[in-house]
Image: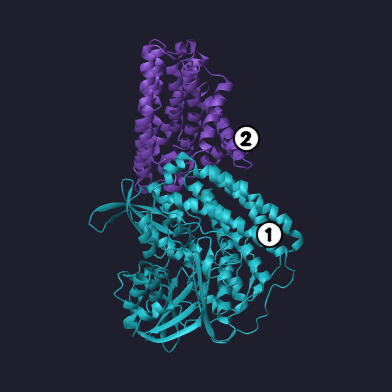
Chain colours: A cyan, B purple
């Protein structure tokens, strides 16, 4: 494959850097970007992961990462542009999955993408001033921006709108706050009767600027920071991050640490999938499944607590290994608990997969075809049900035990909601298998050797990936030899998966849309953790808010009397 | 004077409300236990009402004021009337009148109509979607409901009085009556708006549909109407099919409602229509033919 890439990019390559056998950085001129991207994406069928924009102060740099899902090699196209009014040709018309990241880089770094169809803001508030780019190096975190008159962020909920072909339609708002969603997000369904004819996705309600914060934290602190991107994937993000740093260092961790990492990461997968299964039941109106799934999820959380001391936010990962060991004396008990999950999974398999009404509600609903799945660059349990055989665990986790044990990747073919459910349920069986094998292996190893000492992070760049419950988590770090990362790019799986809703939900009923939107297992806090915007203003703190609300209650009471 | 007593106290408003609240408590408690939750205390329905009636009602700016205010009350009143007539036939056979079966069946369509009007008057896209779903739901089950009533009418030799129907041997002990009574269970589930037929309020899709803009006492009226319907419908179904009512029959019907509710996901409105028109309606036709033949 490497030779093929070299051949196909003949004449375009300015510099080819091979950081390791799985990481290749290819510098090209920006005028060649479109043709190069098209060749890699269409001809060689590499998957577009994400683009990373960097402010090098002297110029702007953008890395386009492509992954070969058969071998786990990542090819990154590197292009440079001017810092002021820098322009790069847009590739969103070639690769649909690049739409959001281009919008994001435009608003956060001020890089213009020529030829992009959609240049509206993705994450920033509409009242954010033009020409202020919060992810640039000259923007200090927490800086206050002057606010306009109409600065309160009120979603402009319209009732009617004209569609692309000029017809009038009603808009059904799902969000920003809606019982369907655990987190604020705004989907505008344009409907005629019950039929959804178009979908508008609005983001940005949950934006915390974690990438900017990471640039101000010590390498070790960042592990804890990224853990807080999402409470559900609180192992996957640090896992990908330490993978990235270890990729930068070229470090291999002790065997025992590999097993411990794998155990905790797979426990997280089971609890996340059970959580999703429950919610899916709730969205279909099947509340019993919801409560049962969450009840049995407790077993998994107990195991997590036994290992790490916490139900979520395990704080297990550290650069070079894991922070806490698993006691060999406790392994038998853990194995018993893990084995007790199998009858539970059988129960759900029976209840969910054989239920005729669930069949009626999920089969051939929200279908994402294989071609579209490739085009939207979706990952994980959104891609695998559509027939894409990609699992990062199989191909690109050096510091995990996935190559040392037996397990299978679950791939389904239809891409509908039912297959997405089946895929997740079967994946839980695989996770139990992985955990049991890892615990067995751990028993034969001596306790104690769980980390490599890492003192300095030399200059360089590294890419770390992990297969989170929702799909591939992507972390890119760059070091200049200092205490903190110069750039830390994070891409959560939902960032790629949620966009595919604009395809899967359209054409169905409103009822279908509800479950379709949920079937990618969207996690908005991941999707939006992205870059740097706090609106700056810490206007009220906790005490003040409390005082204000008490005053208001008093006032209202007075008025009522 | 006596009629006012029937309407307001027994077996009308007060009695039906209390029975409905208890039934609602049982429903919630059993559901909770099935789902490994603790469930509410027995007075929870009462607390709910108390809370609603001490809060303010917000009327949306663009709503049609009169319709918006009147429909909850009408909803409750029509439910109470059903409770009164069905109860009178059982408790005061002398006060009942010939043809109350028809009156009850008609009165039972008024609550959904109120809901449709309320949804349409709310000026909210989700409420209007809820209203349109309610229309489709009514269209689906009403046909089957009338067919089952027709089976009763044929089986009892043209009886339209609840008292006389209850005095005859129970209809359900025959082929036609058996089919019809099972179909009536489907209709009851749909009329009560329980899963899998809670399409019109589906909270994860359209956020309670027609109820979305209602708050305070106005929502309280709807709530009371729902309690009364929960008390009345099993009572009514039991009286016409099972030859009268007692606590066991009532609780058995309630348990069926709860069990179905807890072991099914929600149907889509199209699927619901298909189920009632193309599967249950032919069945009811078979039942009617059997009844005419005399089975």
Confirm whether residue B187 shows in the render.
yes
Spot occupied by residue A240 in the image (x, y as percentages of width and height):
55, 71
Residue occupied by mark 2: B42
Drawn side of residue A314 relative to residue B57, left or right:
right
Drawn side of residue B51 relative to residue A120, left or right:
right
Drawn side of residue A302 relative to residue A26, left or right:
right
Viewer-side residue, B53 vs A301: A301
Viewer-side residue, A544 vs A438: A438
Determine the residue located farthest toward the left in the rendered image. Answer: A166
Quadrant assignment, res B283: top left
Q: Residue at x 43, y 65 (%)?
A: A496
Spot occupied by residue A287 in the image (x, y as percentages of width and height):
53, 43
Quadrant assignment, res A87: bottom left
Q: Residue at x 23, y 57 (%)?
A: A165
Mark count? 2
Residue occupied by mark 1: A305
Confirm whether residue A132 shows in the render.
no
The secondary element bearing badge 2 is classed as loop
How packed mark 1 is, by other alpha carbons closer than 10 Å (few <14, some 14-19, many 20 or more), is some
Viewer-side residue, A3 vs B93: A3
Q: Does the residue at mark 2 contact the one at mark 1 (Cβ under 8 Å)? A: no
Quadrant assignment, res A292: top right
**Pointer 2 and pointer 1 on the same chain:** no
- Numbered disc in front, either 2 or 1: 1
């Amino acid at each position: 494959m490497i030779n093929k890439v070299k051949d196909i990019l003949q004449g375009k390559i300015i510099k080819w850097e091979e950081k390791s056998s799985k990481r290749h950085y290819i510098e090209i001129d920006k005028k060649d970007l479109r043709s190069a991207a098209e060749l890699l994406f269409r001809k060689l069928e590499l998957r577009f992961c994400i683009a990373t924009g960097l402010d090098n102060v002297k110029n702007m740099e953008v890395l386009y990462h492509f992954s070969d899902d058969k071998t786990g090699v990542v090819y990154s196209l590197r292009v440079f542009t001017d810092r002021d009014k820098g322009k790069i040709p847009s590739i969103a018309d070639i690769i649909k999955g690049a739409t959001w990241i281009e919008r994001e880089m435009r608003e956060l770094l001020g890089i213009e993408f020529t030829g992009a169809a959609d240049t509206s803001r993705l994450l920033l508030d509409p009242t954010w001033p033009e020409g202020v780019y919060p992810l640039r190096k000259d923007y200090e975190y927490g800086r206050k921006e002057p606010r306009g008159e109409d600065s309160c962020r009120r979603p402009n909920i319209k009732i009617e709108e004209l569609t692309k072909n000029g017809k009038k339609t009603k808009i059904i708002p799902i969000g920003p706050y809606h019982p369907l969603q655990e987190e604020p997000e705004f989907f505008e369904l344009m409907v005629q009767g019950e039929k959804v004819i178009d979908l508008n996705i609005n983001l940005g309600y949950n934006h915390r600027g974690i990438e900017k914060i990471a640039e101000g934290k010590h390498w070790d602190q960042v592990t804890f920071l990224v853990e807080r991107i999402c409470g559900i994937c609180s192992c996957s993000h640090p896992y990908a991050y330490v993978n990235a740093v270890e990729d930068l260092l070229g470090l291999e961790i002790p065997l025992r640490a590999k097993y411990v990492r794998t155990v905790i990461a797979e426990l997280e997968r089971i609890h996340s999938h059970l959580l999703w299964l429950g919610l899916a039941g709730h969205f279909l109106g099947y509340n019993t499944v919801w409560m049962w799934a969450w009840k049995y999820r407790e077993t998994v959380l107990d195991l997590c607590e036994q290992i790490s001391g916490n139900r979520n936010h395990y704080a297990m990962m550290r650069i070079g290994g894991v922070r806490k060991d698993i006691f060999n004396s406790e392994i038998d008990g853990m194995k018993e608990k893990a084995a007790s999950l199998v009858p539970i999974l059988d129960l759900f398999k029976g209840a969910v997969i054989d239920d005729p009404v669930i069949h009626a509600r999920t089969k051939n609903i929200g279908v994402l075809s294989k071609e579209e799945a490739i085009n939207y660059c979706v990952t994980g349990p959104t891609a695998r049900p559509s027939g894409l055989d990609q699992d990062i665990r199989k191909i690109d986790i050096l510091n995990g035990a996935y190559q040392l044990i037996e397990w299978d990747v679950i791939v389904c073919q239809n891409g509908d909601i039912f297959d997405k459910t089946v895929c997740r349920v079967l994946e839980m069986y695989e996770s139990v298998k992985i955990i049991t094998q890892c615990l067995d292996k751990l028993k034969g190893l001596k306790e104690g050797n769980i980390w490599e000492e890492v003192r300095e992070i030399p200059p360089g760049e590294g890419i770390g990936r992990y297969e989170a419950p929702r799909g591939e988590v992507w972390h890119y770090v760059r070091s200049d030899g200092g205490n903190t990362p110069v750039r830390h790019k994070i891409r959560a799986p939902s960032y790629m998966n949620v966009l595919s809703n604009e395809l899967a939900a359209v054409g169905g009923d409103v009822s279908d849309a509800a479950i379709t939107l949920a079937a990618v297992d969207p996690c908005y806090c991941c999707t939006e953790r992205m870059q740097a915007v706090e609106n700056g203003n810490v206007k009220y703190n906790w005490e003040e808010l409390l005082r204000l609300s008490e005053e208001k209650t008093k006032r209202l009471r007075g008025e009522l009397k | 004077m006596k009629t006012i007593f029937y309407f307001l106290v027994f077996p009308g408003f007060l009695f039906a409300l209390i029975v409905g609240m208890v039934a609602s408590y049982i429903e919630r408690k059993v559901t909770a236990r099935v789902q490994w939750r603790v469930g509410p205390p027995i007075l929870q329905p009462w607390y709910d009402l108390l809370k609603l009636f001490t809060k303010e009602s917000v009327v949306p700016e663009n709503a049609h004021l009169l319709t918006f205010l009147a429909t909850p009350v009408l909803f409750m009143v029509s439910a109470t009337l059903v409770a009164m007539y069905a109860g009178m036939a059982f408790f005061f056979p002398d006060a009942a009148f010939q043809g109350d079966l028809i009156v009850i069946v008609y009165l039972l369509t008024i609550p959904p109509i109120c809901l449709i009007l309320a949804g349409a008057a709310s000026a909210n896209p989700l409420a209007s979607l809820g209203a349109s779903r309610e229309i489709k739901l009514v269209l689906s089950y009403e046909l089957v409901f009338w067919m089952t009533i027709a089976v009763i009418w044929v089986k009892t030799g043209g009886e339209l009085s609840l008292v006389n129907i209850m005095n005859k041997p129970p209809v359900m002990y025959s082929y036609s009556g058996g089919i019809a009574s099972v179909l009536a269970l489907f209709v009851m589930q749909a009329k009560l708006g329980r899963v899998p037929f809670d399409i019109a309020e589906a909270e994860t899709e359209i956020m309670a549909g027609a109820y979305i803009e209602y708050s305070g006492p106005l929502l309280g009226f709807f709530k009371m109407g729902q309690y009364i319907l929960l008390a009345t419908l099993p009572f009514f179904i039991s009286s016409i099919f099972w030859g009268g009512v007692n606590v066991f029959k009532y609780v058995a019907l309630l348990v069926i409602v709860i069990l179905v509710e807890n072991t099914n996901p929600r149907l889509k409105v199209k699927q619901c229509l298909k189920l009632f028109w193309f599967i249950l309606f032919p069945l009811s036709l078979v039942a009617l033919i059997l009844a005419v033949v005399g089975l």
